[in-house]
Image (cartoon, helix red, strand yellow):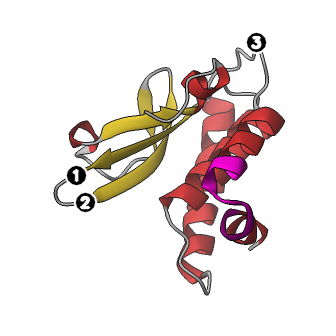
Amino acid sequence: MFLDFQIRRKGFDEVFRRYIKKYTIEGSKEIFTEENSEEILEWFILLDQVCCWYPRKADCIHKTLIGYKILQSKYGIPVNMVIGIKKFPLEAHAWIQYQGHNLFEEMENLDSLKVIIDSNSYMKGVELR
């Protein structure tokens, strides 16, 4: 609920910037292990359920920001937030990548989306494309 308020009040760009600055752990080299994979999967199942029952619309951007926060701050796993768009039909989507692979992603046609920003590039000073 607080994240939704932040996005509405401060705008996506400001929230995206804050999440990157606050939750990115420089030099993090943690990896998915059998031990933490099950726990992480449980977090994301819970996140999906919460988003389904949230009284307002919780979109992929909410899941991506919260997932980024969990994976970076709780597990120290260096993931990348990615946002892509497609012009026709107009579509936008946000997702999380780990070592270039999409995590927990149901959407099969991510290749049809043009990436406009990702957290790794943003940290290096690259703005929206």
- Residue 74 falls left or right of residue 42: right
Q: How many residues crowd around disc 3 within 10 Å: few (fewer than 14), some, or many (20 or more)?
A: few
Residue 63 image point, x, y percent: 58, 57
First reached walking from the N terminus: tag 1 or tag 3: 3
Residue position marked by numbered label 2 in the rendering: 90
The numbered mark, 3 or 2, whose residue comes first in the sequence reads: 3
Q: Is residue 106 visible?
A: yes
Span of residues in magenta: 7-15
Mark 1 vs 3: CB contact within 8 A: no
Which residue in the structure is indicated by mark 1?
87
- List the residue tagged with mark 3: 27
The Cα–Cα distance between marks 2 and 1, rounded to whole angstroms, is: 5 Å
Give the dominant element type of the magenta stretch: helix, strand or loop: helix
| Helix, strand or loop status at disc 2 | loop
Q: Are marks 2 and 1 in contact (CB under 8 Å)?
A: yes
Judge the density around disc 1: few (<14), some (14-19), many (≥20) Cα neighbours within 10 Å: few
Q: Residues within 10 Å of mark 2 (few under 14, many from 20)?
A: few
